Image (spheres, rainbow, N blue to C red):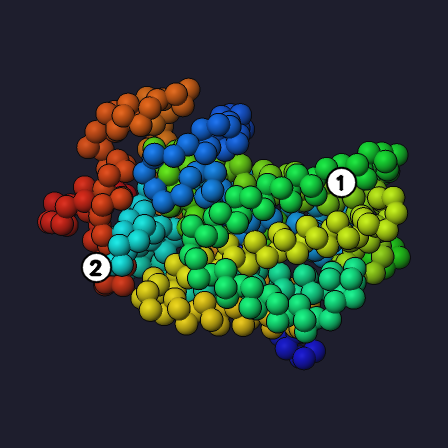
């Protein structure tokens, strides 16, 4: 087992090293931020209004689930163990400075999240089974209409299916089992059985069933977690200046060992911060666009802005609170990262129920993450092998969710980092190649509706026959397994003069 762990560590360090994913991840975020003129800052209030205001639950638009339900499903897949256990793991290995690099990755990642969710809606279509579908496995093939685009599409789909067993499955089961055992002495085997069976039963209802669960569960758990976290930080307010100092100094200077902390270099802080940030908010991975692509929305720009707020909530709010709770209570130098946050809450809240609250939040959020990622994996299995293969995937995924509760934590996290990185690479390349389309069509929409008050009829009128009109995406059927997938922008059969959308 040690030799396997060592081999996986080597692969992870290569993928997340200074010459591959780190510059690609940061570079794409910065590139999209510049090209979109800081859209995550200049349209932030509009994005929050669209995401959490009354219009977020509006029905009657084109799509399968409401915009808010799509965002909740994506949040369900992101807000989970990455925000609770992942932050502790990043700090325990990379030091407090890792939190700073999580913030930076997330800030620029908001632009990447906007672009990928824009493209998810922009190129969404009906699959051969008549279901609305979208995401990198679709827009990489349709938006880059050549062999390279199809290669990126297949690479993403393969890596996504494999990654679902790490980030969206085994890590969640592992963290749930560890915390249930720590807080309630529940045997991991019992957790494994319940989690496996519960996951299988939930997947029978499909995306609409998943959306109903996440729309109720995720906002409630986030508010509960944030509320108690802010209370702990307020009680330990005297430790805030020291925590800020540790974060800033650790981001740019090596840190020596302290207590249970083994010390880290600046590169390790950057590496762990970026890896855990990507694990948590998934900006640049493309997965959120799979849920965004079926949202009821009147234009890709609107859903892109809504989806962008996921990264803000996930990292700049929830992760920040976790990090400050760990640092202000002094628990960052103590023990196992799997239960570090739970012990920090137990220390910060009166009585014995602090750890219980964290465990309850982690169990519910972790389980919702499993459901969200199951949908992502299922859509990509269908991309690779057809609708029938999705049934087999559901069974394997459910079994793996239970087995994850029994697997070694370090091995599971390392495997997740590797697959997350491999999945992000084709999507990030695609975002750069399709950035011109995103910028042009974003500008077109904002020129006609800068205040976001246009009705669906008004949007349809000024979009007219433009390639970005939604009618084509909802009525056009594309067989992505074909060597020459249909790329018509109008919904008609592709002909010699059909445009490509590049």
The vertical placement of 63 against 135, above or below, is: above
Q: In the structure shown, which secondary structural element does the residue marked by tag 1 occupy?
A: helix
Q: Which mark is residue 13?
A: none
Task: Report the quarter where the N terminus lies.
Answer: bottom right
Q: Residue at x 61, y 71 (%)?
A: 193
122 to the left or right of 88: left
- Which of the 4 image quadrants contains residue 370? bottom right
Counting from the top left corner in percent of width and height, residue 133 is at 34, 51
Quick one: label 2, few (<14), some, or many (20+) residues within 10 Å?
some
Q: Residue at x 26, y 35 (%)?
A: 469
Q: In the structure shown, which secondary structural element does the residue marked by tag 2 occupy?
A: loop
329 to the left or right of 18: right
- Which of the 4 image quadrants contains residue 311? top right
Quick one: label 1, few (<14), some, or many (20+) residues within 10 Å?
some
Counting from the top left corner in percent of width and height, residue 97 is at 74, 46
Q: Nearer the viewer, residue 181 or 309?
A: 181
Q: Residue at x 61, y 67 (%)?
A: 194
Q: Which mark is residue 228?
A: 1
Q: Is residue 118 visible?
A: no
Counting from the top left corner in percent of width and height, residue 375 is at 45, 57
Task: Report the quarter where the C terminus lies.
Answer: top left
Mark positioned earlier in the residue sequence (1 or 2): 1
User: Which of pointers 1 and 2 indicates the residue nearer the eye?
Assistant: 1
Q: Is residue 321 visible?
A: yes
474 to the left or right of 106: left
Q: Residue at x 35, y 50 (%)?
A: 134
Q: Nearer the viewer, residue 202 or 244?
A: 202
Q: Residue furthest left?
A: 496
Q: Which mark is residue 484?
A: 2
The vertical placement of 69 against 138, above or below, is: above
Counting from the top left corner in percent of width and height, residue 212 is at 49, 47
């Amino acid at each position: 087992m040690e030799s396997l762990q060592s081999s996986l560590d080597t692969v992870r360090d290569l993928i997340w090293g200074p010459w591959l994913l780190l510059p690609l991840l940061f570079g794409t975020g910065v590139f999209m931020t510049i090209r979109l003129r800081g859209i995550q800052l200049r349209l932030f209030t509009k994005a929050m209004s669209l995401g959490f205001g009354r219009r977020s639950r509006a029905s009657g638009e084109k799509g399968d689930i409401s915009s808010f339900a799509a965002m909740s499903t994506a949040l369900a897949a992101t807000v989970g163990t990455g925000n609770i256990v992942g932050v502790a793991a990043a700090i325990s290995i990379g030091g407090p400075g890792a939190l700073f690099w999580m913030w930076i990755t997330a800030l620029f990642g908001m632009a990447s999240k906007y672009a990928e969710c824009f493209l998810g809606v922009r190129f969404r279509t009906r699959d051969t089974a008549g279901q609305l579908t979208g995401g990198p496995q679709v827009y990489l093939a349709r938006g880059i209409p050549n062999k390279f685009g199809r290669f990126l599409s297949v690479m993403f789909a393969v890596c996504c299916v494999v990654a679902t067993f790490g980030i969206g499955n085994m890590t969640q089961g592992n963290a749930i089992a560890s915390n249930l055992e720590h807080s309630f002495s529940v045997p991991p085997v019992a957790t494994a059985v319940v989690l496996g069976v519960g996951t299988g039963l939930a997947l029978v209802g499909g995306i609409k069933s998943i959306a109903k669960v996440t729309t109720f569960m995720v906002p409630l758990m986030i508010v509960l977690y944030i509320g108690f976290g802010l209370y702990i930080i307020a009680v330990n307010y005297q430790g805030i200046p020291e925590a800020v100092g540790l974060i800033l100094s650790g981001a740019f200077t090596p840190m020596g060992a302290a207590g249970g902390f083994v010390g880290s270099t600046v590169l390790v802080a950057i590496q762990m911060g970026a890896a855990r940030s990507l694990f948590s908010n998934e900006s640049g991975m493309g997965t959120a666009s799979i849920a965004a692509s079926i949202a009821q929305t009147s234009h890709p720009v609107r859903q892109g802005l809504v989806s962008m707020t996921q990264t803000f909530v996930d990292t700049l709010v929830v992760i920040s609170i976790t990090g400050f709770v760990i640092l202000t209570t002094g628990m960052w130098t103590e023990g196992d990262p799997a239960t570090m946050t739970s012990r920090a809450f137990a220390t910060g809240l009166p009585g014995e129920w602090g750890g219980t609250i964290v465990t309850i939040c982690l169990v519910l959020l972790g389980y919702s993450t499993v459901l969200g990622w199951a949908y992502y994996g299922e859509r990509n299995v269908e991309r690779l092998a057809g609708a029938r293969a999705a049934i087999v995937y559901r069974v394997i995924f459910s079994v793996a969710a239970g087995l994850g509760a029994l697997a070694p934590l370090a091995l599971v996290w390392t495997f997740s980092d590797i697959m997350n990185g491999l999945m992000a690479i084709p999507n990030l390349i695609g975002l750069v190649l399709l950035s011109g389309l995103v910028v042009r069509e974003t500008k077109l929409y904002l020129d006609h509706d800068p205040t976001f008050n246009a009705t669906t009829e008004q949007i349809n009128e000024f979009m007219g026959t433009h390639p970005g009109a939604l009618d084509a995406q909802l009525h056009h059927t594309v067989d992505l397994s074909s060597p020459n997938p249909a790329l018509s922008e109008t919904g008609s059969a592709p002909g010699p003069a059909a445009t490509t959308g590049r």
